[in-house]
């Protein structure tokens, strides 16, 4: 950014005029409220015209595998239609570690699975959690806004069900969704008993906010650190129980027995290149999302390791996916300053009353539409109606009028309820309680994935799934607060189901990579180029100039 | 419509694939473990290290300031102070001389909180070293979240769990305080235990207990049977009427709710 | 609902005391770690007693642990950060004095205060290190509550305000080490102190002077070599018993703990309860007996007190 660009309160001078217009219109907008929410027909039309999922050219039909013919984003298809990093015969498969349950992924879902498998009677030293980065490095830890649970008298699990079903465009698996909403109050009780600190009012009851697409306020939050608070508490509990843990050891391939039952995984030490062969009676896949694929070139809210590894591994083992054709773009990712582009601006900001406003100071959309609708509306405002701001680096965005929160709930609310976000903007010289913030949609959530039943079971024996990697619970669009809930509910259920399974199951007689052979043949028949390999493991942001001049010498 | 997508993709290239040198007008020099690199001004330390050719295995996590993976220690030219930062949230400065500390060794004791009283004695039992605190305030100065860590440890020392919680809530457990502490306290483990203990002094709200009991007793069984048996069209219709008109999703905006978030819905 | 005793540690004058009378004097006090946890009875009774005398003891804001033990090494500046930071807090309030209740806190703070004032270079270096605080300029006087009662409030005033005479109660004041030694910070003559006896007399009680009243209780040896503490305590308590004591009064939570825990109780002798002097002070000044934290002590003094119908 050129130094000649003078910054006032953190913003380039040329944006001040628009900020002033937002300030001017604020009293009127507080009084009148924003435009009303859209009818179902209006929503549909908007999505078809402006939502990235609907724009042609971004997706294609898969050529191989259990979902052959189904549509997935190109970036995901590139990974699913790719050769393994490790092919049969390339590594010796002597078993290094033998456990009952192998959990892949160290976020909320994986950690829950471990704890509940042990609650169901599996000894902790027979459970191994392997994670690509550190235990806790996940999308879970960044979840800000909250966790939904229908635990107030004005609410019920059935209403929660309908909200999620409508938000998911009526494509959610009803029995799986039912499990989600019915377990939710129990999850809140259990977390509280562990010492998790959700926001409470002066009577000791949970403060519960609105979220996009919800008809009742039921979002439980721990300030804007909800995911972090939940995860650090259950991680602390995990650490007291004696589970096996391997960090910086991603799985690069699942192992199967001769009958096709999942029997473990090949783990790879990212720091020493050593691999380990783990045999397990059951594998729980909790590997999270795919934001770092930057689908359609969007920035992302996701953590460094969100590269769809689990999808790839499961696909090769024969697991069926669903709803891969939809991608959730969070309507409000930070658009300015450049250093934080794409980072999550939680829906809670809108839940607390901030309106979405264009450069003229007009609120142009109901702030709490379901996320896909909201995102499409912002894209329309920026790129069609062109009533947006353009940042010095060429990004477009609209205002999220955060100072409204102070007006509605009292001065100091933002610092109290959104301390993480407040601090983030302060680091870059912006006071979000005084000035609005600039937002644009950002790639956020994998709505679909490996199809699951209400107990985390897949169509592949021995393979269980939980969390963002799964498909079915959210249908084609997830509501805010249902993702952390998904991880917690299905992490627990997968742990319980896997525990029950391993109590009955025999250990795998043999671990093989044989399931890859059929897959490789399919790839060859489909003419997939040999160089295409997956899983990706980590994205690569190294400077182009440097990459053009590197040699791999060691 | 497709060209909208292309324009979005192009606008975001700096973030998704890396900076294009031709767009950079200003440069600075940063020293990564002593080696100087010319990098674009006004990017984060994390982006600068990647620009210079480092591919993170350690030292990158959420990239958003929540996970503490990118703890960085640095000095700037002419300033004797040792400073700390999160690489993903901090802009580079010309002459910045930095190293990353992605891991701090710390032993976390194991405990079963069902068996421990939720008060200061439990903290001292598992972390007697908090009594070694000399109130030097080095931990506070090391904290990239600007938390008053010394005050938190002092509160822990006298068993004031609520105060520890207030002061330490935003802790992302990066470990810089523990690394710098002359008394070798592991602050983030102490405060984690304190917060859990404090949480355990608060009872589960009655409304939650009631709802859990209702669900266990099968109160919603009939309603769900009905929902499960409906077709997709019927559910769509139900959503339309119950949720949107009759139920709660008013046409007024959500800011019109009471302080506790209770709507009329 | 939160546990009641949890709140007790954060008791300020607003929670339990009646409105301050118009002629009160206000002075900051340093609680120290023990008074917030194991020795809550000491803090509570001190505040109630002072209020009854028309004084307001208000808690020093943002105080930290005094460090407990004064560092004897002449170049160990780091150990003085803790105490000096507390003096800065008092200075920030514009206060010239800071009252301590726990004898060990008093001793550590007072000696540290003298240490840094004795050599400007020490103070300069400490101030330079604590660059996030205002510089400590020196001059905050650390005062023990017994000094305040003797020198400012005055025994006459105290006697005049006694509502419930402790007549007939034989109390052995135990000084321990920290109130009297070293001489520079001692609040009384270390060979022949009288301050606690005089205070007890003004309450109507019968002070019992006994030879071991200023001998060390063993202090921290109770943790690492308990037999040392046991030996010391048994000599001290049996000395008090022989002198006719019904209760022992002290001003130090560690002494109080040691004297309680290491008494040798046989069928020959019943235990002697160890109270904080402020509990007796408050009781005599009319504060109801159930507000003084007697139930928080391990050895119950109430049987002795109820014989004189005091509780």
Image: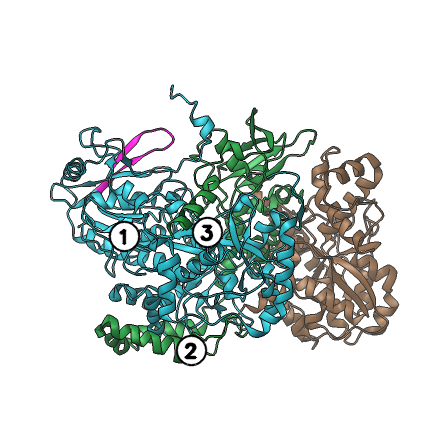
Chain colours: A cyan, B green, C brown
Q: Which residue is mark 3?
A: A142
Tag 1 subunit: A
Name of the residue lying farthest toward the bottom: B246
Quarter of the image with the N terminus of chain A in it: top right
Q: Position of residue A474 (x, y in %)?
A: 32, 61
Whole-angstrom CA distance, mark 2 to mark 1, is 33 Å
Task: Decide if residue A550 is on the left or right side of residue C98.
Answer: left
Q: Which residues are magenta?
A: A264-277
Q: Which residue is mark 2?
A: A154
Q: Which residue is mark 1?
A: A465
Dividing the picture into quarters, in which one does residue A500 lie? bottom left
Q: Position of residue A282 (x, y in %)?
A: 22, 48
In primary-sequence order, the first of circles 2 and 1 is 2
Dividing the picture into quarters, in which one does residue A43 lie? bottom left
Identify whether A291 is placed above or below B161: above
Q: Residue at x 73, y 62 (%)?
A: C277
Q: Secondary structure at mark 2?
A: loop
Q: Secondary structure at mark 1?
A: strand
> For residue A322: magenta?
no
In primary-sequence order, the first of circles 3 and 1 is 3
């Amino acid at each position: 950014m050129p130094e000649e660009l003078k910054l006032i309160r953190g913003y380039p001078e040329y944006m001040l005029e628009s900020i002033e217009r937002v300030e001017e219109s604020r009293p009127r907008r507080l009084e009148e409220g924003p435009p009303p929410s859209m009818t179902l027909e209006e929503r549909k039309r908007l999505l078809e015209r402006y939502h990235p999922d609907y724009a042609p050219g971004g997706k294609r039909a898969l050529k191989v595998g259990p979902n052959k013919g189904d549509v997935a984003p190109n970036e995901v298809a590139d990974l699913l239609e790719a050769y393994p990093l490790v092919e049969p015969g390339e590594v010796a498969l002597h078993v290094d570690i033998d456990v009952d349950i192998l959990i892949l992924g160290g976020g909320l879902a994986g950690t829950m699975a471990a704890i509940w498998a042990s609650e169901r009677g599996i000894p902790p030293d027979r459970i191994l959690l392997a994670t690509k980065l550190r235990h806790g490095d996940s999308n879970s830890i960044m979840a800000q806004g909250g966790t939904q649970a229908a635990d107030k008298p004005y609410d019920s699990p059935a209403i929660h069900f309908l909200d999620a079903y409508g938000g998911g465009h009526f494509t959610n698996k009803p029995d799986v969704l039912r499990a989600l909403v019915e377990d939710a109050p129990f999850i809140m009780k259990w977390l509280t008993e562990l010492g998790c600190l959700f926001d409470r009012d002066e009577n000791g009851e949970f403060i519960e906010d609105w979220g996009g697409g919800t008809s009742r306020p039921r979002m439980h939050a721990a300030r804007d650190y909800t995911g972090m608070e939940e995860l650090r508490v259950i991680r602390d509990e995990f650490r007291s129980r004696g589970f096996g843990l391997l960090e910086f050891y991603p799985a690069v391939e699942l192992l199967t027995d001769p009958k096709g039952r999942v029997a473990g995984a090949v783990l790879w030490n990212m720091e020493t290149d050593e691999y380990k062969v783990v045999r397990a009676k059951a594998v729980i896949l909790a590997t999270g999302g795919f934001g770092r694929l930057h689908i359609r070139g969007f920035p992302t809210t996701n953590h460094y390791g969100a590269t769809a590894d689990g999808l790839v591994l499961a696909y090769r083992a024969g697991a069926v996916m669903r709803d891969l054709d939809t991608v959730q773009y969070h309507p409000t990712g930070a658009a300015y300053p450049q250093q934080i582009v794409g980072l999550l601006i939680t829906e809670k900001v809108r839940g607390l009353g901030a309106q979405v406003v264009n450069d003229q100071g007009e609120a142009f959309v109901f702030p709490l539409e379901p996320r896909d609708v909201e995102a499409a509306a912002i894209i329309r405002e920026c790129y069609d109606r062109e009533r947006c701001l353009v940042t010095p680096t060429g990004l477009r965005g609209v205002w999220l009028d955060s100072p409204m929160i102070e007006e509605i709930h009292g001065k100091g609310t933002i610092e109290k309820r959104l301390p993480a976000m407040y601090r983030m903007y302060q680091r870059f010289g912006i006071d979000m309680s005084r000035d609005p913030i600039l937002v644009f949609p950002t790639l956020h959530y994998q709505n679909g994935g490996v199809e699951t039943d209400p107990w985390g079971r897949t169509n592949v024996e021995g393979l269980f799934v939980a969390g963002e990697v799964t498909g079915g619970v959210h249908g084609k669009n997830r509501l805010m607060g249902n993702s952390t809930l998904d991880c917690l509910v299905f992490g627990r259920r997968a742990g319980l189901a896997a525990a029950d399974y391993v109590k009955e199951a025999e250990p795998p007689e043999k671990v093989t990579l044989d399931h890859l052979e059929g897959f490789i043949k399919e790839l060859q028949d489909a003419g997939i180029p040999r160089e295409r390999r997956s899983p990706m493991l980590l994205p690569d942001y190294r400077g182009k100039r440097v990459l053009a001049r590197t040699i791999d010498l060691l | 419509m497709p060209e909208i997508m292309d324009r979005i993709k192009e606008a975001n290239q700096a973030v998704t694939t890396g900076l294009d040198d031709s767009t950079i007008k200003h440069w600075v020099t940063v020293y990564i473990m002593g080696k100087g690199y010319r990098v674009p001004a006004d990017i984060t330390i994390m982006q600068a290290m990647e620009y210079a050719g480092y591919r993170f295995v350690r030292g990158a996590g959420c990239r958003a300031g929540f996970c503490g993976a990118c703890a960085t220690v640095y000095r700037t030219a002419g300033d004797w102070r040792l400073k700390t930062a999160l690489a993903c949230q901090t802009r580079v400065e010309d002459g910045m001389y930095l190293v990353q500390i992605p891991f701090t060794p710390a032993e976390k004791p194991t405990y079963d909180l069902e068996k421990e009283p939720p008060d200061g004695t439990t903290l001292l039992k598992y972390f007697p070293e908090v009594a070694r605190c000399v109130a030097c305030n080095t931990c506070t100065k090391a904290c990239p979240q600007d938390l008053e860590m010394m005050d938190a440890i002092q509160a822990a020392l006298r068993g004031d769990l609520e105060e520890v919680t207030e002061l330490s809530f935003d802790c992302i457990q990066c470990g810089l305080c523990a690394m710098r502490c002359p008394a070798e306290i592991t602050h983030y483990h102490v405060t984690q235990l304190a917060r859990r203990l404090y949480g355990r002094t608060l009872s589960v709200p009655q409304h939650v207990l009631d709802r859990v009991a209702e669900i266990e007793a099968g109160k919603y069984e009939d309603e769900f049977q009905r929902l499960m048996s409906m077709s997709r069209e019927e559910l769509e219709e139900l959503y339309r009427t119950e949720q949107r008109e009759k139920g709660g999703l008013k046409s007024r905006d959500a800011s019109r709710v009471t302080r506790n978030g209770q709507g009329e819905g | 609902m939160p546990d009641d005793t949890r709140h007790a540690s954060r008791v300020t004058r607003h929670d339990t005391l009646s409105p301050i009378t118009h002629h009160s004097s206000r002075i900051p006090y340093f609680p120290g770690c023990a008074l917030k946890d194991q020795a809550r009875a000491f803090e509570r009774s001190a505040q109630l007693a002072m209020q009854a005398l028309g004084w307001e003891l208000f808690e020093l804001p943002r105080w930290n642990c005094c460090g407990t033990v004064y560092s004897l090494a002449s170049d160990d500046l780091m150990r003085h950060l803790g105490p000096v930071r507390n003096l800065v807090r008092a200075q920030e309030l514009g206060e010239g004095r800071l009252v301590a209740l726990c004898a060990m806190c008093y001793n550590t703070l007072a000696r540290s205060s003298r240490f840094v004032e004795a050599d400007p270079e020490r103070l300069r270096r400490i101030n330079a290190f604590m660059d996030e605080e205002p510089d400590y300029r020196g001059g905050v006087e650390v005062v023990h509550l017994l000094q305040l009662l003797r020198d400012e409030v005055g025994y006459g005033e105290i006697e005049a305000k006694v509502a419930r005479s402790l007549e007939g109660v034989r109390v052995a004041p135990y000084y321990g080490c920290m109130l009297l030694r070293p001489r520079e910070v001692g609040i009384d003559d270390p060979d022949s102190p009288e301050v606690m006896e005089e205070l007890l007399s003004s309450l109507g009680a019968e002070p019992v002077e006994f030879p071991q009243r200023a001998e060390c209780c063993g202090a921290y040896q109770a943790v690492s070599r308990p037999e040392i503490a046991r030996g010391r305590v048994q000599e001290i308590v049996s000395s008090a018993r022989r002198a006719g004591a019904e209760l022992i009064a002290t001003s130090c939570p560690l002494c109080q703990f040691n004297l309680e825990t290491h008494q040798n109780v046989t069928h020959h002798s019943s235990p002697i309860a160890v109270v904080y002097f402020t509990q007796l002070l408050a009781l005599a000044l009319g504060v109801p007996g159930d507000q003084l934290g007697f139930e928080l002590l391990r050895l119950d003094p109430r049987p002795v007190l109820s014989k004189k119908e005091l509780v």
